[in-house]
Image (cartoon, rainbow, N blue to C red):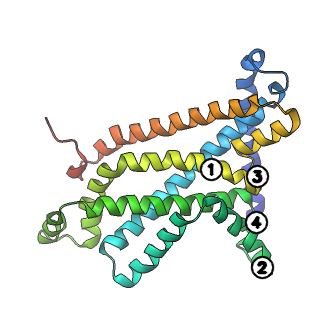
Amino acid sequence: MIEGLFKSIYFWFKGWHYDVGKSLCGPLESFLTASIGPHCPRLIDGFFTTFELVILALILAFLLARTLAKLLALGPRFIQRPITSYVYVFQGTPILIQLWLIYYGLAQFEFIRESAAWLFLGSGWWVGLIVLTLNSAAYQTNILIGAIQNLPQGQLEGAQSIGLNARQSYLKILLPQALRASWPALANEGILLLKASALVSTITVLDLMGHARTVFSRSYDLWVYGGAAILYIILTALITLIAFIIRRYWFQSLPSDPWLKEPSR
């Protein structure tokens, strides 16, 4: 039942992607080569698939990194060591190996194929989302903990002196200031994850690069990759714009956290 629900949602989004692709590609048909024009909706579908995958991974990775950074900053040592090992492993191995080990490696075990986890581990899209999330969370954790460690020690001591517990100190004082200091690095991580997401095409995901490879294998027109490059540049611009909007407006909408406000000049 759950598998059927996921498939229904997946095909609904795919249908929506193609409908939008057809409406966008129609006016551009005269500018496209004869070998690319019929496949233009596929590239638009890949564009939306990549965007959705990367945005979801970044959101989930940030939620995970926020918790892991808190444990690294304020948690006991026996919790910090596994987190440090996780960050080290995912930062120290290529994302392609991570994708292949989880997608192709875990499929070798029969008990996994027969378990409920196979609903996710048997799907390239879900494995791509899981790996991108875990990979980005490792980098975001490192970025956040670095920003927290650079804060003056008096910040935490001041919070404790007014009766804030560890959770309140982290959420109201440490994290807001760390976010402001590390936001450019976090935005760059989003762009790097976008470029790394092209590797999910190696595990059967028809993202932008996956569709570009499929179209090229049928047309042998190198302009397919030129079009894909333009769409990746547009995706980069979208992520940069989202990061700017969050920094410009969302940071300013937290009156309970005065540390997030720009100092008056």
Secondary structure at numbered mark 3: helix
How far apart marks 4 and 3 lie (CA) works out to 17 Å
Secondary structure at numbered mark 2: loop
Q: Nearer the viewer, mark 4 or mark 1?
A: 1
Spot occupied by residue 69 in the image (x, y as percentages of width and height) = 37, 66
Sequence-wise first label, 4 or 2: 2
Q: Are marks 4 and 3 in contact (CB under 8 Å)?
A: no
Q: Which residue is disc 2 drawn over?
A: 109
Q: Nearer the viewer, mark 2 or mark 3?
A: 2
Spot occupied by residue 155 in the image (x, y as percentages of width and height) = 17, 63
Residue 122 shows which numbered tag?
4
Horizontally, is 168 left or right of 234 in the view?
left
How far apart marks 4 and 2 lie (CA) works out to 12 Å
Spot occupied by residue 175 in the image (x, y as percentages of width and height) = 30, 59
The residue positioned 77% from the left and 72% from the top of the image is 107
Residue 8 shows which numbered tag?
3
Structural crowding at the residue carrying mark 4, measured as other residues with C-alpha within 10 Å and reported as few (<14), some (14–19) or many (≥20): some
Q: Which residue is disc 1 drawn over?
A: 197
Q: Nearer the viewer, mark 4 or mark 2?
A: 2
Sequence-wise first label, 2 or 3: 3
| Kind of residue at badge 1 | Ser
Sequence-wise first label, 4 or 1: 4
| Kind of residue at badge 2 | Phe
How far apart marks 2 and 3 lie (CA) works out to 28 Å
Secondary structure at numbered mark 1: helix
Sequence-wise first label, 1 or 3: 3
How far apart marks 4 and 1 lie (CA) works out to 18 Å
